[in-house]
């Protein structure tokens, strides 16, 4: 039997071996280690090559150059190309599509998913001839549609129609599957991949008109009265009117789909629907498909007025005409996809799929094979040895977590730095007790952190962790989460490392201290003082706050008579006395020359603050001891209180400065409270 040929182009032999294992039961696999060799194989077997799996980074010719060459050979319509790369940035993926790639798979990938995607694309090319290229203009259009969807759906949510948020996702998915089946069966509809995407996206707006229906009617548990049902039946027209008001800013084709679906999704094939009583193909095709999808979802979902019916019962009711009349062609398509429909909807709902009957479906041909070739096993063993060698040479602790087996594994460096086993089984129940990833370790490690997603897979944080020497050291924890390539990605696990950044954090702390402190006295400088006071004022206030503005009296005379070196000693003496007088939680600073500032909070009364200022005046008023003599010294203090005199540092400083000016005018060596 002549099997179709699958060409695997990758310069890493292990990567080729793994893909070979996946495909060899259904395809004759040919391998190439560089771009030039790839093109030789493709040209030689051009009539039999069914698929090309192409790495981007390769010697001689890279993946992009191979794609360009395939285009020059006019083979882009004949041979589908799946690009494979560990990098998955939007620009890189877009370039692949612009050059004619049929699909893009990012590493790491699930082998079963790769096989299914390969088979789907091969089948699609066999029946359809080619997949349309996704150009930059189409991507911009899709982004515009998504913006439109988000803005519109945000308005819908505010009105709370009462239906599950999953309803929109299910309608979109069911619509997409029906359209795909329709495009294969009936070419005359001219459904393209882009058109299917647009209609499926527009389907989410089918019930937007319900924002005009009172919530008590939408969520009424019992039967509706004729009057209430008449109000409900207005929602297609209300929705269409809403879309008419905003369509001038949208792509016309996409708007037409949105409008048709919104207005006509309750029309019926036999003319018995509303609001316009259209019949047969008078009803736009997009609205026909969404109508069928909406009925299926309504039957299989729990509503306030009914329980959820089983998949089998819902299909039977639709086929028997219990829910209205539908296009016979659409019913054929529903029957074609109904075996997979129930399982897919359950997956969308986040439920564990249950097989309808007869147990799980048969695996694809070759999937039952458990043996792996000796070549692949040897390559995997080489990779394991290389990983262990690299891990042993690294100063970092490496780890990986496998969600399916719930196993956390550390490199050997872990045992030299921390307590604990290198392999932790049942990690989900133990990760908190490890304490190595902090109190939220389960979120960081197990992929439960809301910041982690397939689009944002990396999480970094810095934690203090106790080492085996009972020392608290700073480590940077870097985690990269791994996700499956399913339409709804599943969390597979993560890779990560712990890097010792204690020296860096210590140096950073010292630099910050140096930047914040006055070089002479060790007190906070003006910028640091203002920043710290501002932060303190933002905290929840308990009691009263006080800001002192203190100035040494006649300090210029001390400098002039005894010299600046002596003056510096007086300033350092003043700083020592102030630090000894005030609490460790108080903020003490020198903001220039002989000017000092203090901020105290959580005072019981203004008198507590004034009393503290008087103590400062008395303490420094005793003079500066020099050998067996005393050099006269005094200080004047102005006081402003928070919140009475202001809630920001600048206002308090200004008012305390005014009070200080008054203290000096009244004779110096005293403190004055700002009185306005």
Image (cartoon, rainbow, N blue to C red):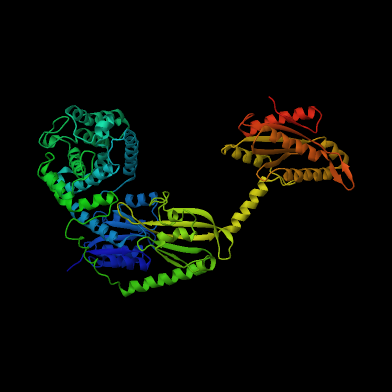
Q: Is residue 172 left or right of residue 65?
A: left
How many numbered discs? Answer: 0
Which residue is at the front of the view, 224 or 179? 224
Residue 653 in sight in this render: no
Q: Residue at x 32, y 75 (%)?
A: 374
Which residue is at the front of the view, 454 or 254? 454
Q: Is residue 566 left or right of residue 676?
A: right
Q: Position of residue 267 (x, y in %)?
A: 16, 34
Q: Position of residue 660 (x, y in %)?
A: 74, 31
Q: Which residue reaches farthest right?
A: 628
The C terminus: image quadrant = top right
Q: Residue at x 13, y 36 (%)?
A: 268
Q: Position of residue 95 (x, y in %)?
A: 36, 50
Which residue is at the front of the view, 91 or 46? 91
Q: Is residue 380 left or right of residue 30?
A: right
Q: Which residue reaches farthest top?
A: 676
Q: Is residue 412 above or below residue 297?
A: below
Q: Position of residue 433 (x, y in %)?
A: 47, 60
């Amino acid at each position: 039997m002549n099997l179709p040929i699958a060409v695997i182009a990758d310069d890493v032999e292990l990567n080729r071996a793994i893909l070979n294992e996946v495909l060899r039961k259904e395809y004759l696999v040919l391998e190439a280690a560089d771009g030039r060799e790839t093109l030789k194989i493709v040209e030689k077997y051009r009539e039999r090559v069914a698929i090309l799996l192409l790495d981007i980074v390769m010697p001689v010719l890279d993946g992009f150059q191979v794609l360009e060459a395939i285009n020059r050979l006019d083979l882009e319509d004949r041979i589908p190309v799946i690009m494979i790369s560990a990098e998955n940035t939007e620009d890189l993926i877009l370039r692949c599509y612009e050059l004619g790639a049929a699909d893009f798979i990012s590493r790491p990938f699930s082998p079963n998913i790769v096989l299914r995607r390969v088979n789907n694309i091969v089948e699609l090319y066999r029946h359809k001839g080619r997949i349309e290229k996704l150009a930059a203009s189409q991507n911009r259009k899709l982004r515009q549609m998504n913006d439109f969807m988000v803005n519109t759906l945000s308005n819908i949510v505010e009105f709370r129609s009462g239906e599950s948020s999953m309803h929109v996702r299910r309608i979109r998915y069911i619509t997409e599957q029906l359209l795909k089946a329709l495009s294969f069966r009936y070419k005359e509809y001219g459904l393209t991949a882009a058109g299917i995407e647009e209609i499926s996206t527009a389907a989410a707006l089918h019930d937007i008109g319900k924002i005009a229906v009172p919530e008590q009617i939408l969520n009424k548990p019992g039967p509706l009265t004729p009057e209430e049902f008449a109000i409900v039946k207005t929602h297609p027209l209300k929705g269409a009117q809403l879309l008419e008001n905003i369509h001038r800013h949208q792509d016309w084709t996409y708007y037409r789909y949105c409008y048709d679906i919104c207005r006509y999704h309750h029309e019926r094939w036999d003319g018995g629907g509303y609001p316009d009583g259209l019949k047969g193909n008078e009803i736009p095709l997009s609205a026909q498909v969404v109508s069928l999808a909406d009925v299926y979802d309504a039957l299989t979902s729990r509503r306030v007025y009914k329980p959820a019916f089983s998949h089998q019962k819902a299909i039977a009711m639709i086929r028997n005409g219990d829910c209205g009349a539908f296009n016979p062609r659409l019913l054929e398509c529903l029957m074609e996809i109904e075996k997979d429909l129930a399982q897919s909807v359950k997956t969308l709902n986040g439920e564990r799929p249950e097989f309808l009957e007869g147990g799980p479906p048969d695996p694809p041909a070759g999937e039952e094979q458990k043996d792996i070739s000796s070549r692949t096993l040897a390559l995997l063993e080489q990779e394991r040895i290389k990983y262990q060698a690299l891990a042993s040479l690294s100063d970092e602790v490496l780890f990986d977590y496998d969600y399916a087996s719930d196993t956390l594994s550390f490199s050997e460096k872990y045992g030299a730095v921390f307590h604990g086993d290198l392999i932790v089984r049942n990690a989900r129940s133990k990760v908190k007790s490890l304490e190595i990833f902090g109190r939220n370790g389960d979120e960081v490690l197990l992929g439960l952190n809301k910041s982690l997603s397939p689009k944002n897979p990396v999480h970094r944080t810095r934690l203090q962790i106790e080492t085996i020497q009972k020392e608290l050291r700073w480590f940077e924890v870097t985690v990269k989460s791994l996700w499956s390539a399913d339409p709804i990605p599943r969390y597979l696990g993560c890779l990560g490392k712990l890097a010792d950044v204690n020296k860096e954090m210590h140096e950073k702390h010292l630099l910050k201290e140096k930047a914040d402190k006055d070089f002479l006295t060790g007190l906070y400088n003006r910028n640091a003082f203002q920043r710290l006071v501002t932060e303190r004022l933002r905290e929840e206030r308990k009691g009263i706050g006080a800001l002192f503005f203190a100035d040494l009296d006649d300090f210029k005379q001390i400098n002039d008579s005894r010299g600046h070196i002596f003056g510096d000693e007086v300033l350092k003496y003043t700083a020592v006395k102030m630090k000894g007088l005030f609490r460790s939680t108080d903020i003490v600073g020198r903001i220039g020359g002989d000017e000092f500032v203090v901020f105290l909070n959580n005072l019981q009364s203004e008198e507590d603050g004034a009393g503290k200022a008087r103590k400062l005046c008395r303490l420094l008023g005793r003079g500066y001891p020099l050998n067996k003599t005393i050099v006269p010294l005094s200080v004047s203090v102005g006081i402003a209180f928070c919140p009475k005199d202001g809630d920001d540092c600048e206002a308090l400083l200004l008012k305390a400065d005014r009070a200080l000016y008054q203290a000096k005018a009244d004779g110096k060596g005293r403190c004055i409270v700002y009185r306005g």
